[in-house]
């Protein structure tokens, strides 16, 4: 979007979504029993896949994690000082010995000289202490990766999206552990650092929708949220991609549960992928286009009506596909004028990127959740929505689950070619947020979120995962929770 188009978007806003209901167990969310859990996990080990990669958004600074420490909130810095020796980052050379002064402890944590954590990215902060090492969040992702993302050749691929100014810090964190972990776990790590494209930044405006000018007279631009990372995801070469936030890691003793459910999500994604591919092959054979040329719009294959769409075999297949879409993806199709229109619509629904998203029982955590919405074509679909996208408070109350950002994505079509992910973004699902710059209020334009509107036009399945797999560190005191203590 040009700056002029962005200003018009600020003025007009975004259209409201037609929300049908919150997704729940039995209607949009699958709860795997022990047999299904094992079958999906086993399928992950045996299914053919063109490479696996773990994708970790890690560009943010840790400043929000220390907001109350910066503000010297008494209850926060007192608890920090009282428990300072329990943190993995504790160093007597920095913090001294007990008794610990709360203000001095806070300053030693945030500033230089000291640890300088106030300006560092969350990924390079020491999260967990072990007998022989203190691990950063970044290092924990390497350990997790070897547990459930190994490729057949023993490689483990991880892509971290970071800020350019933090590259040296991440490279140092990698150098400190790479050789030791490769030897310990018998793997070879392929680590890639990518940056959010500055071209996706959006302008800020004043409360009355005028360009927000900095003190030097230039227009303030801001990163447009994690939705911009769809460009980075589209650059990944591997077919199967696991997405998880940088701060959602636990100590290694809890890894078996995390790995079991992550493998189950991957296995389920591959099970669904293989069924989708099977239906596409059957469809193209009946339609007489085997193999089908790769086109983004299937309608181009059939310039005129053909009786082959009305055959008994094709109608039986379409009925089966329609049931599959409803049962597995909560997609209910609208009425169609004729057999051809229905058949082409069903095929188009199949031929898209696919994702399986873990969902956790709602226990009061902030964040988005799983919903069923009505699309422009009259069909329904599963979507992850943020609270800012939901105008009816009663719908939020209906929600039984929330989004922990635990996704598995299949990024190739039935011919093994990469999908153009940008073609499946819904630009109408961005949102406007209120921010501030040097104490002045502004409005910011957020692109459709990575797991929200940026994946709007994907085949989507929701699976319940246990709360034990969700251990984010949003504030520094979260590191005192059992999942982060040995």
Image: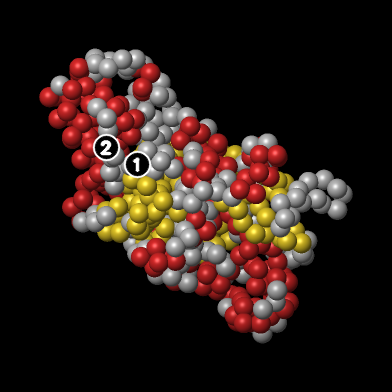
User: Quarter holding the C terminus?
Assistant: bottom left
The secondary element bearing badge 2 is classed as: loop
Above or below: residue 211 compared with residue 282 = below
**Image location (x, y in percent) of residue 151:** 38, 36
In this view of the protein, which residue sits in the foreground, 92 or 429? 429
The quarter of the picture where residue 349 lies is top left
User: Quarter holding the N terminus?
Assistant: top right
CB of mark 2 within 8 Å of CB of mark 1? yes
The quarter of the picture where residue 34 lies is bottom left
Report which residue position mark 1 lands on: 378
**Image location (x, y in percent) of residue 390:** 47, 58
**Image point (31%, 31%), residue name:** 345
**Image point (48%, 65%), residue name:** 366
The quarter of the picture where residue 412 lies is top left
Instruction: Specify which label sits upstream in the sequence, 2 or 1.
Output: 2
Which residue ends up furthest to the bottom in the rendered image?
A: 99
**Image point (49%, 40%), residue name:** 426
**Image location (x, y in percent) of residue 87:** 57, 70
In this view of the protein, which residue sits in the foreground, 390 or 50? 390
Left or right: residue 116 versus residue 256 is right
**Image point (20%, 40%), residue name:** 323
Report which residue position mark 2 lands on: 335
In this view of the protein, which residue sits in the foreground, 197 or 468? 197
Q: Which mark is residue 30?
A: none
Which residue ends up furthest to the right in the rendered image?
A: 216
Which residue ends up furthest to the front in the rendered image?
A: 337
Left or right: residue 174 versus residue 389 is right
Q: Is residue 14 visible?
A: yes
**Image location (x, y in percent) of residue 387:** 49, 60
């Amino acid at each position: 979007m040009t700056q002029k188009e962005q200003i018009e978007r600020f003025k007009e806003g975004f259209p409201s979504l037609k929300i049908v209901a919150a997704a729940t167990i039995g209607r949009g969310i699958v709860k795997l029993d022990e047999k299904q859990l094992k079958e999906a996990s086993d399928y992950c080990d045996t299914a053919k896949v063109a490479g696996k990669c773990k994708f970790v958004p890690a560009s943010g600074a840790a400043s929000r994690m220390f907001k109350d420490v910066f503000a010297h909130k008494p209850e926060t810095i007192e608890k920090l000082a009282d428990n300072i020796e329990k943190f993995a980052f504790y160093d007597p050379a920095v913090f001294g010995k007990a008794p610990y002064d709360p203000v001095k402890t806070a300053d030693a944590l945030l500033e230089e000289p000291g640890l300088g954590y106030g300006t560092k990215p969350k990924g390079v902060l020491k999260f967990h202490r072990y007998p022989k090492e203190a691990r950063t969040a970044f290092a924990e992702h390497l350990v997790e990766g070897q547990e459930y993302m190994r490729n057949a050749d023993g490689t483990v691929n991880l892509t971290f999206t970071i800020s350019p100014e933090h590259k040296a810090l991440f490279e140092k964190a990698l150098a400190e552990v790479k050789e030791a972990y490769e030897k310990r776990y018998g793997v070879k790590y392929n680590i890639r650092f990518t940056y959010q494209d500055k071209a996706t930044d959006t302008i800020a405006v004043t409360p009355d929708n005028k360009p927000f000018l900095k003190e030097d007279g230039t227009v303030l631009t801001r990163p447009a949220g994690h939705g911009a990372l769809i460009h980075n995801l589209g650059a990944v070469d591997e077919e199967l991609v696991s997405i998880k936030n940088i701060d959602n890691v636990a100590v290694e003793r809890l890894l078996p549960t995390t790995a079991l459910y992550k493998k189950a999500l991957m296995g389920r994604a591959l099970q669904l992928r293989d069924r989708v591919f099977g239906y596409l092959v059957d469809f193209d054979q009946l339609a007489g286009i085997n193999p089908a040329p790769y086109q983004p719009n299937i309608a181009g294959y059939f310039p005129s009506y053909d009786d082959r769409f009305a055959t008994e075999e094709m109608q039986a297949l379409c009925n089966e596909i329609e049931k599959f879409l409803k049962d597995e993806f909560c997609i209910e199709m609208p009425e169609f004028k004729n057999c051809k229109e229905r058949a082409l619509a069903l095929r188009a629904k199949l031929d898209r990127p696919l994702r399986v998203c873990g969902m956790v029982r709602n226990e009061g955590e902030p964040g988005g959740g799983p919903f069923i919405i009505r699309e422009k074509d009259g069909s329904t679909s599963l979507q992850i929505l943020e609270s800012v996208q939901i105008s009816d408070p009663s719908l939020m109350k209906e929600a039984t689950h929330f989004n922990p950002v635990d996704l598995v994505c299949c990024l190739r079509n039935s011919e093994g070619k990469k999908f153009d992910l940008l073609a499946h973004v819904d630009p109408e699902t961005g949102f406007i947020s209120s921010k501030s710059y040097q104490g002045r209020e502004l409005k910011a334009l957020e692109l459709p979120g990575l797991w929200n509107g940026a994946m709007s036009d994907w085949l989507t399945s929701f699976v319940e995962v246990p709360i034990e797999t969700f251990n984010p560190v949003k504030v520094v005191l979260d590191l005192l929770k059992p999942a982060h203590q040995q």
